[in-house]
Image (tube, coloured by chain):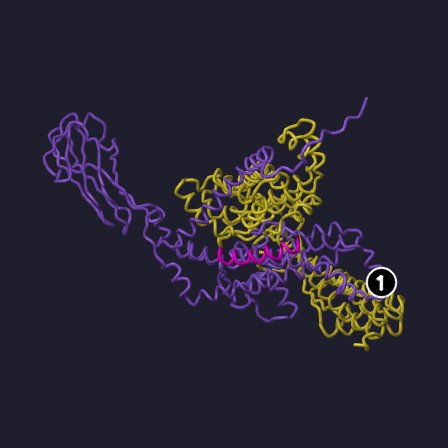
Chain colours: A yellow, B purple
Amino acid sequence: MKTFHHAYVTGPVLGALWTFVIAVTVSITMSFATGEPFRPTLILALLWGAVIGAAAVHSRMAAGIAALGVAAVGLLGFGPILSGDTVSPFAQIVGHGAMALCAALGMVSIMRNAPKGALTRHEFEEAVIRFLTGFGYIFFTAIVVIPFYVMVMTSLKSQQALLQNPLDFSIDFSKGWGLFRSYEELFRDHGFGIYLLNSFFISVITVVVTLLFAIPGAYAVARLRFKGRAAFARSILLIYMVPMIVLALPIYIAFSTAGLRNTIFGIVLIYPVTTIPVALYMLQGYFRGLPAEIEEAGLMDGLSRLRVIWKITLPLSLPALASVSLYVFMIAWNEFLLAFMLLDDPSKFTLTRGIASLNSSEIPRQHLMAGSVIATVPIMALFLGLERFMTKGLTAGSVKG
Amino acid sequence: MSQTDPPVGPPAHPPRGTGPLAKREARLAWGMLAPTIAAVALVVILPLLAIFWISFKPVELANLRPPEVTVREDVRGKPTAPGDEATLRYRLRNSSQEASIAGVTLRDTLPEGIEIIDGLGDSCAVTGRELFCDFGDWEGGARERLQIKVITAQAFFDGPSPRDSAPIVTGTASNILTNFSFTGENFARIFDSSEFFKVLWVTLFYTVFGTIGALVMGLFAALLLDKSFKGQGILRGLYLFPYVAPVIAVAFAWVLLLDPFSGSINALLVQMGVTDQAINFFGEEPLALIMVTVFEIWRYFPLSFLFILARMQSIDTEMYEAADMDGATPFQQFRYLSLPQLLGILSVLFLLRFIWTFNKFDDIFLLTGGNAGTRTLTVNVYEQAFALSNIGAGAAVAVVIFCCLLLFSVFFFRVMSQEEGL
């Protein structure tokens, strides 16, 4: 272990690893962006990486020269990444240039505080942590972005182009509005407009009903003293853990016999109940954090309990109400199982149910992805716009999946 | 103004028992909770009881529609002029092949201008124009054909068609869901099959590795974002995407991405020389299970990341400064300072996520449909109840799930009480 604690050992080792990471990243990025063949080479990447690492330990200047060298050998075909013969010169320059630049800059940054000779444990670990941090950002961003990127790009392409080269996600802008043909067809032929409306309507109703039930319940659990309060608080959590699939079976039977299957009313009846326990749990946590003195002052001044809630507690807890609403909206919007089991009539589908109906071999997959984008975009927009509330709402009470 | 001493009396005691105020408060509390309790009882407690009930019943999907008598009526013999003979025909059938129907009767208004000559049989009688038949009790699959020979008069042709008055049939069938015949066959069936233990093993693998994976990834992501820099907010929002997006959308994106024939990942792997042949990620026996677990980790690391980050940001930074002064290295700081502080949230998260992963249905159902060795207990409920049409067996699996869940939650509340003082 001690032998690693020398700059000219640590540098090349981290350099080799780092350069390989960058080689893979750049190859995937270039492949997805252009559809041309780029691939990393393990041995060469490690070798050149060690060189860059050693250069970065020596000086910034040396690292810059090493970067130029790596870019040059890359263009000649001996670099950390190999590009096929068909790749255009421009893409080659961009690819190998980005490769060398990222590798060198990253290494300079990783070895920033390290002296040239022996490293203390502190300096060594700092370098390792910087390497891991860089790797972490790339890794997490890649795994999150790639599925969504592929989702959007697939929805803009034609079946033929996809089968020809599954890696080619470049967009042909000359098509203009023709790019959005899948979306147009979904809205025109598959009734996604109605699904969108249904989903929106159901989600909003769910939020309203949930709040109507959960606010008084949460207040009672948080503020009022009564026998069985602790037991009640626990049973909320317990109910929160009952899996939907266990309940779905009897609900299916009951709805079948009561004629509520295939009605939006039935869905609106059932969704809030799945969200009330969550909302109640989140809200009671927030209510408990509010100072009781303000409410007591209100009570002393002659307000009734209900008016205290209406005039004092609710205005104070607007942020919590916002996050709970958002969270409940998200659950209702994303709900799949109940919609899938209870809805058969296309005019009553929600978006998730509509997408499920697109999952057949007869329907081209760009339609499936376009449907997914239609379902994802509104909730993402809402989420990004109100991210602060959402983050709070999620941490407040939801460990629910 | 003189200050008066408080009146001297017997020493004051705090009130004992529940006073009227406390009673009023409790009444108000229960009043406010009543709607929630009612709704939850209706949609959670009642179905749970129903599941236990159904799990002891030999009920199939087809039994959900109760058996009934269907009837068809027509006129045979093509009467064209008064005096022609015709036959009024009623065909009755028990819609179920197995279930019996008790007290089957038929009632109909006969058309005008006919004279019955034959075919009433023992079970039917006509009073005025009212036809009434009593067929007694029927076995499953029973049929009955009633052919009434009549002579028509002019009024028959003038009046409305005989089919205008719909015949009314009655009969009571015992509903399999509400009667009192029970069977232990459902449980015997699911426990007997060797498949059950495979399902159990798959569930355990999925749950344990899914939970641990999501926690470790979440911890790593939280460590990355536990410093303020430009774009931290954007990255934090971005890393939550997998959790916020509809599961059906991301699941299908994964399926397309990993498709063995036209998936981008396979094309990428082939191009990079990692593999010669396309890999069927969701179709091969051990790989499919690993892939659905990876999906689970991918989808839920944001949640643990969020919770761990929230806890990290509440840790006092002075402690780290002190440790820095004492020469603790970054890894030592993490091991001896951060980790002990995070242990509480990590254990709570572990238990909650464990329970939730155990309960997860949508993800696997959408990715593989429970094929290729990925059938967990929850998917098995669906498989038994809807794919195999055996509602009773599905309910039995659901009961098994619920019992496991009770076990976990006892454990959970024990840990939770220690950690959060709940």
Res B45 visible: yes
Asked whether B257 or B6 is in front, the reply is B6
Asked whether B224 or B109 is in front, the reply is B224
**Is most of the magenta stretch helix, strand or loop?**
helix
Res A161 visible: no
- Is residue A126 inside the magenta stretch? no
Give amino acid for label 1.
Asp
Write down the quadrant of residue B239 in the picture.
bottom right
Label 1 neighbour load within 10 Å: few <14, some 14-19, many 20+:
some
Write down the quadrant of residue B2 in the picture.
top right
Residue A115: % across, % down: 89, 70
Residue B33: % across, % down: 55, 38
Residue B386: % across, % down: 42, 54
Chain under label 1? B
Query: Which span of residues is magenta-colored?
Result: B401-420
- Is residue B408 inside the magenta stretch? yes
- Report whether B259 appears left or right of B398: right
Quadrant location of the N terminus of chain B? top right
Asked whether B412 or B172 is in front, the reply is B412
Q: Which residue is mark 1?
A: B324
Write down the quadrant of residue A385 in the picture.
top right
Point out the residue furthest to the top here. Answer: B1
Residue A155: % across, % down: 60, 50
Asked whether A375 or B243 is in front, the reply is B243
In the depicted structure, whether residue A41 falls above or below residue A374: below
- Report whether B157 appears left or right of B380: left
